[in-house]
Image (cartoon, grey):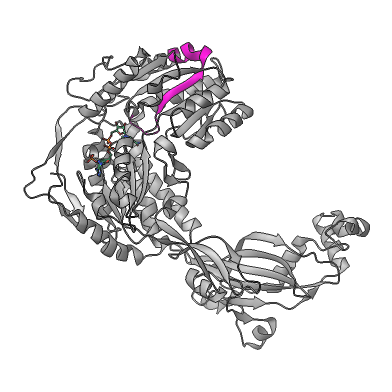
């Protein structure tokens, strides 16, 4: 009996009444029995909200992200075990690369992005600060904080590892404990992956629970604190979305459902072009990877009418010459079985519906040739190509045959192709194969609004493309309409924010500094000046290691006057002799300048000279400058001064230094703001004895 992992213990039912048998997809041999009879789902949810929240909450975003990296490493070391189990689902080694390696890779990307792009705290600021009062004493901005409930995943059978990890990565970084509910058919692979993660010792108590088997009452125990990410059929999504607790109880619900994705051959990409070859390769790959059991698979192959026959022929020829159906444990096999006999029957029924609606069978079909594969025992389905005389046949845009099946449809022109693609009612992804930028732009405008992702394929990117079917953690995965209307992956760290609430916060600079851990202009500062540093009364912030530095530590320089000679010398040495710096008459004719002005970069360079503390010390490097804006021109005989304030301190988990962001403001002698920007530095965590 496949165990569940609930309240930090493995659990199996004592005397189950309802038990499902799970079989090897290729041989039909029993793999495991599965039952959740008597499982206390409510207790699992409560455990996540209490123990799971507490355990993850003890860590910062970076600490959790770093754990993900190590969890990914542990899974990588043990992936052969996952491969061996995945074989039993009918998946080939190539398929394992998508599911197992793809899942591990996704964790790594989230780990890296989380540590690079998010702060090492538990509050994320979103966007700029708005000044809401004239004097700057009242500000507003947006922050993200984690949800206080459970991240419930309900997953499909086709990606037992990736399906879990792509959702776990973001929720774990956000700090929200996960309850995984894999599809029963392939739950034994997910269970092994969860067991490995727990074995790694890196998962805090309550952070991951697993329900191995059905969980029909799961949503009954959820409320506005919890988030459900569902992947599976549109019908189940609809049923769950209608649940009382989603409709009235505020459960956050996203769905990624089946969609009838299109691959569109551009009018310029006919037979004989490299684009045509890339297109055929892509469609056959997308039909056969995971035996077509991919939410992103190409269901509709939309091509110029005059090329329908050539496309059908090319697909047939490539599929016939390359596909060897069989048990994935046989080396010769290139395409494995569907996940179960039920799925095989389901795909057969869908193809039959398409044929009855007017489709012509060009290859394969329910009775098609499966070669030497054991058709009796295994859930094999041959690659199947249909074509339709009427490209607007409703069924072809509505019925998803969740296997290696595609329908070829002819279009008259780009507008017609766009309309055909739109008949899918919203899709996860489309490929547009063209080498013409204008055609690409026309398709982007036409199909963008009903797609989550569009891959433009031509001979330049054919070799380097990650492919139509691969959702990437960097980009949106999800789609409007029939595709579920959600973003399972939001594109980078947006996925993390799905597990957080965005809240507007208003208050004084001091209070918002306290709330966010980021210094706001106008908040209290601990100011050092050249005089107080010289007298030993104050310490220059550049002499403080991360252990000593606090946000609000500030250095305010004295004034330095800009002479005309300085401007001309800077023009001479840099070669930037733009007229505004060198030609008095032309500068005066310019609407923005009173006369010749200092280069902005001269001012920024001088500012560095005004704030720097030159001796070796904890500041290790200046890694950049962000958000530079020049606001008031500085002409000769004006003076500038700089105020530098430690704005954000991000200690690294893996190094003996961290990042410090310094708010930087240049003023002139009239206290007008000349320029603002952030200086980025790396600062040592501890002072070395020789710097002390
Ligand atoms: P389902 O929608 O039936 O199941 C998906 C998940 O939902 C499974 O984990 C299932 O669990 C669970 N589930 C079903 N009912 C409930 C409920 N009332 N409460 C809580 N959880 C529930 O999809 P299938 O896996 O059966 O696949 C059916 C079809 O869906 C496929 O043929 C294909 O067309 C499409 N599909 C689309 C995918 C996509 O990625 N977009 C992926 C997979 C399938 P359990 O297994 O225990 O019933």
Q: Is residue 14 magenta?
A: no
Q: Is residue 370 left or right of residue 458?
A: left
Q: Is residue 574 left or right of residue 180?
A: right
Q: Is residue 299 magenta?
A: yes
Q: Quadrant of residue 442?
A: top right
Camera-side residue: 488 or 91?
488
**Residue 453 in picture, x, y percent from top left:** 48, 37
Q: Quadrant of residue 350?
A: top left
Camera-side residue: 453 or 244?
244
Q: Is residue 670 left or right of residue 547?
A: right
**Residue 75 in picture, x, y percent from top left:** 31, 48
Q: Examine the rendered structure and indicate whether residue 401 appears above or below residue 153.
A: above
**Residue 640 in picture, x, y percent from top left:** 76, 72
Camera-side residue: 481 or 442?
481
Viewport quadrant of the C terminus = bottom right
Can you tell me which quadrant of the image ligand 1 is in?
A: top left
Camera-side residue: 573 or 551?
551
Magenta stretch, residue numbers: 293-313
């Amino acid at each position: 009996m496949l165990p569940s992992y609930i309240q930090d213990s493995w659990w199996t039912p004592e005397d189950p009444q309802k038990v499902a048998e799970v079989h090897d997809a290729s041989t039909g041999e029993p793999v495991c029995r599965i039952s959740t009879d008597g499982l206390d789902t409510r207790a699992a949810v409560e455990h996540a909200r209490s123990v799971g929240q507490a355990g993850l909450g003890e860590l910062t975003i970076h600490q959790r992200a770093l754990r993900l990296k190590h969890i990914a490493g542990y899974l990588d070391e043990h992936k052969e075990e996952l491969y061996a189990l995945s074989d039993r689902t009918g998946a080939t080694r190539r398929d394992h690369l998508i599911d197992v390696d793809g899942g591990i890779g996704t964790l790594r990307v989230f780990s890296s992005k989380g540590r690079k792009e998010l702060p090492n705290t538990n509050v994320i600021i979103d966007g700029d600060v708005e000044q809401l009062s004239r004097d700057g004493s009242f500000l507003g901005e947006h922050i993200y904080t984690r949800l206080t409930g459970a991240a419930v995943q309900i997953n499909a059978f086709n990606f037992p590892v990736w399906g879990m990890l792509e959702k776990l990565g973001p929720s774990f970084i956000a700090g929200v404990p996960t309850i995984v509910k894999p599809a029963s058919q392939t739950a034994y692979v997910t269970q092994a992956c969860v067991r490995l993660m727990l074995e790694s010792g890196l998962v805090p108590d309550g952070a991951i629970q697993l329900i191995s088997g059905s969980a029909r009452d799961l949503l009954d125990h959820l409320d506005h604190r919890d988030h459900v990410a569902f992947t599976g059929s549109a019908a189940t999504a609809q049923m769950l979305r209608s649940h009382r607790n989603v409709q009235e109880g505020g459960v956050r619900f996203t769905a990624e459902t089946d969609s009838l994705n299109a691959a569109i051959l551009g009018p310029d990409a006919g037979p004989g072009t490299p684009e045509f070859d890339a297109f055929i390769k892509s469609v056959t790959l997308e039909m056969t990877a995971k035996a077509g059991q991919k939410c992103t698979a190409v269901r509709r192959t939309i091509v110029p009418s005059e090329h329908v026959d050539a496309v059908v022929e090319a697909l047939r020829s490539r599929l016939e010459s390359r596909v060897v159906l069989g048990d994935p444990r046989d080396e010769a096999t290139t395409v494995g079985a569907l996940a179960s006999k039920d799925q095989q029957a389901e795909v057969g029924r869908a193809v039959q519906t398409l044929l009855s609606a007017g489709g012509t069978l060009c290859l394969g079909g329910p009775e098609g040739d499966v070669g030497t594969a054991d058709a009796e025992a295994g859930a094999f389905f041959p690659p199947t190509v249909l074509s339709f005389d009427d490209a607007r046949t409703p069924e072809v845009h509505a019925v998803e045959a969740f296997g290696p099946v595609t329908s070829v449809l002819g279009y008259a022109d780009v507008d017609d192709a766009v309309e055909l693609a739109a008949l899918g009612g919203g899709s996860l992804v489309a490929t547009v194969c063209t080498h013409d930028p204008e055609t690409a732009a026309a398709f982007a405008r036409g199909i963008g609004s009903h797609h989550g992702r569009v891959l433009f394929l031509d001979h330049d990117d054919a070799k380097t493309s990650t492919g139509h079917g691969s959702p990437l953690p960097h980009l949106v995965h999800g789609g409007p309409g029939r595709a579920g209307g959600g973003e399972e992956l939001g594109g980078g760290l947006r996925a993390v924010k799905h597990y957080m609430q965005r809240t507007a916060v208003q208050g004084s600079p001091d209070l918002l500094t306290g709330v966010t851990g980021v210094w706001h202009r106008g908040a209290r500062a601990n100011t050092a000046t050249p005089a107080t540093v010289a007298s030993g009364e104050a310490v220059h912030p550049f002499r403080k290691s991360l252990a000593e530095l606090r946000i609000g530590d500030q250095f305010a320089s004295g004034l330095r006057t800009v002479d005309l000679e300085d401007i001309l010398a800077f023009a001479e040495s840099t070669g930037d002799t733009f007229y505004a710096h060198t030609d008095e008459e032309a500068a005066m004719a310019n609407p923005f300048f009173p006369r010749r002005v200092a280069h902005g970069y001269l001012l920024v360079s001088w500012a560095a000279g005004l704030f720097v503390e030159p001796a070796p010390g904890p500041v290790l490097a200046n890694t950049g400058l962000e958000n530079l804006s020049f606001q008031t021109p500085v002409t000769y005989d004006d003076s500038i001064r700089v105020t530098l304030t430690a704005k954000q301190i991000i200690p690294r988990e893996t190094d003996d230094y961290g990042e410090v962001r310094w708010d930087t403001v240049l003023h002139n002698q009239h206290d007008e703001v000349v320029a603002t920007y952030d200086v980025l530095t790396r600062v040592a965590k501890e002072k070395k004895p020789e710097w002390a």
